[in-house]
């Protein structure tokens, strides 16, 4: 890891999760948390988010233990942190939302600390397009911007979302959302429609089925998911993917095909660690050798010589 | 293509299919038909199956035009050919069976012509395990046997199915069936449970999400599906995959990692051609250059240098 930085804006949350095998209450979560933890192995993340007074120092400490700059996380006195509760089905993919308490997140207004404004790499987590645009207004020096979105924003604020899409380099999106946004069922067609909306690259995340990168000037790249014997909690996998990807790109500070390919592999590997524990426990204390070992396992799976 | 042969046993059928975009009535189909068409580009297929008097010479001619030996297809006088009717949902993956008329297929008793009995490579399509065992009794010289199965046989004749699994080299199975047979949700665990049942290799077919090969002595291999702009009819994709795979293995007559990897690529490519037309139309007249072009597109998608 060098001194390269990556600005990450998104939710900081408590997750209460039930799976068929175990459960956890009010554990550290949120898109900015998963993404910054994953990115921290490859670049220095700076987080912008909002929490309540119930977000104790132990949570700040966990983020800081990974070298993450948390000065952009605002604490609202007397407020409560965003809380999401969900239950996974037996297949560990489908899930039902049991409860969503936006709390202080409802008033999130991303104002960047002065030293964040020169960030070279920016990841806009899954927040409303108005807020994403506001971050872009404050980061005019960024060399590479990635963004996430979700079905809600595609359905309800499509116009604003498209305005943001024109201003970013890369969109991370899952396959269902890619179809929803493009009106296309085949992923190649969906990706090409999305590129017409502005981004230079789109990464279609397909969960346990891998991820696909399509860009205007590179041939399609596909990375399968890591084969795992045990999945504890899929929450945050997509954010860990994006964080690993963006951290790798920031660390490499290049956008050639080889860098994008290794960023795809890195995102895939970080997502695989994320799902093997609840909360961010799988991303807290990884050794370089563990990360490299999974890179090699992936390379072996697609080594056809 | 050299003189290597591959024996293919399975259904020969008429398919009536509706998709959201088009439909076809009583078109040539069946597992043995799709598999032998796909195999025919890499080895000389010999087919064992059963049809009714309504299976006209034009259908035999189509098979023979690909160099397929049809002397093992028995015609039942006054009988009617197996007929399946189904309708695909908008996602072109889920489907409902509208009608199944087994007709002469109900009395299928695979007796091999004498010159088929020395076949070096055998593919047992999706027929009952009793019939699969009967084919194995007549092919003791086979060097490599691949088989398919389905949810019906796993649910209703598991004991007999396991007896057959002990006698084959490779099982082709889709992901849902792999979970059903093994009781495991994670594909790595499912594959390992299946290997304990006897086969040396298992190929888990995941449709548009690619295919995974796990074997006792090779590291896992994964091949993504070809990115297609248009899917006309997914029927027969799995059989075309298995046929392409088995044909390639028969043509190469080797079972090293490189051969298995290229067999996976070949199966993937042949399935991609199959789904772009109704019936076997996509597999009738392919040029070597078309096949090589898709091999190269796949290799490029996973080329991370």
Image (cartoon, coloured by chain):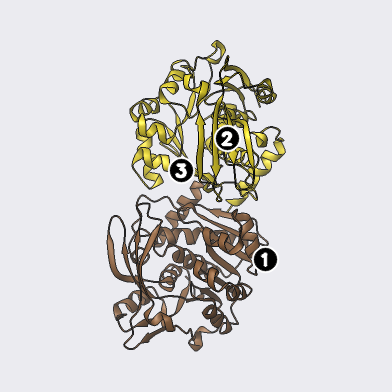
Chain colours: A brown, B yellow
Residue A144 x %, y %: 59, 73
From the viewer's side, name the closer residue of A124 and A78.
A78
Question: Which of the 4 quarters of the picture holds residue A280?
Answer: bottom left
Pointer 1 local density, CA inside 10 Å: few below 14, some 14–19, many at least 20: few
Mark in front: 3 vs 1: 1
Check the picture and name the quadrant holding the C terminus of chain B. bottom right
Mark in front: 2 vs 3: 2
Q: Residue at x 42, y 32 (%)?
A: B200
Question: Which of the 4 quarters of the picture holds residue A293?
Answer: bottom left
Residue B174 x %, y %: 46, 40
Q: Which residue is mark 2?
A: B240
Pointer 3 local density, CA inside 10 Å: few below 14, some 14–19, many at least 20: many
Q: Residue A3, relative to residue B154: is it above or below?
A: below
Q: Is residue B305 visible?
A: no
Q: Is residue B246 visible?
A: yes
Q: Residue at x 38, y 28 (%)?
A: B161
Q: Which residue is mark 3?
A: B220
From the viewer's side, name the closer residue of A22 and B246.
A22
Q: Which mark is residue A196?
A: 1
Residue A298 x %, y %: 48, 51
Label 3–label 1 contact, CB within 8 A: no
Marks 2, 3 in one chain: yes
From the viewer's side, name the closer residue of B86 and B41.
B86
Q: Residue at x 53, y 63 (%)?
A: A173
Q: CA distance from mark 2 to mark 3?
A: 22 Å
């Amino acid at each position: 890891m060098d001194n390269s930085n990556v600005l990450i804006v998104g939710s900081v949350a408590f997750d209460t999760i039930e799976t068929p095998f175990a459960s956890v209450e009010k554990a550290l979560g949120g898109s900015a948390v998963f993404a910054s933890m994953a990115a921290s192995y490859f670049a220095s993340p700076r987080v912008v988010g909002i929490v309540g007074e119930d977000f104790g120092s132990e949570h700040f400490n966990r983020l800081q233990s990974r070298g993450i700059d948390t000065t952009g996380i605002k604490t609202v006195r007397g407020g409560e942190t965003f809380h999401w509760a969900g239950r996974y089905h037996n297949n560990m993919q489908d899930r039902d939302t049991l409860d969503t308490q936006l709390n202080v997140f409802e008033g999130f207004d991303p104002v960047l600390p002065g030293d964040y404004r020169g960030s070279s790499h920016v990841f806009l987590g899954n927040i409303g397009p108005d807020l994403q645009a506001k971050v872009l207004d404050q980061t005019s020096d960024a060399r590479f911007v990635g963004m996430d979105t979700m079905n809600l924003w595609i359905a309800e604020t499509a116009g604003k979302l498209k305005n943001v899409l024109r201003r970013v380099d890369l969109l991370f999106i899952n396959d269902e959302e890619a179809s929803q946004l493009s009106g296309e069922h085949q992923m190649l067609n969906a990706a090409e429609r999305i590129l017409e909306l502005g981004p230079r690259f789109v990464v279609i995340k397909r969960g346990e089925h891998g991820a696909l990168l399509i860009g205007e000037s590179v041939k399609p790249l596909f990375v399968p998911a890591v084969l795992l014997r045990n999945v504890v909690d899929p929450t945050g996998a997509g954010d860990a993917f994006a964080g690993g990807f963006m951290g790798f790109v920031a660390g490499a500070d290049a956008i050639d095909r080889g860098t994008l390919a290794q960023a795809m592999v890195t995102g895939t590997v970080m997502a695989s660690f994320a799902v093997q524990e609840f909360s961010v426990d799988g991303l807290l204390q990884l050794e370089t050798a563990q990360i490299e070992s999974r890179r090699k396992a992936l390379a072996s799976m697609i080594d056809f010589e």
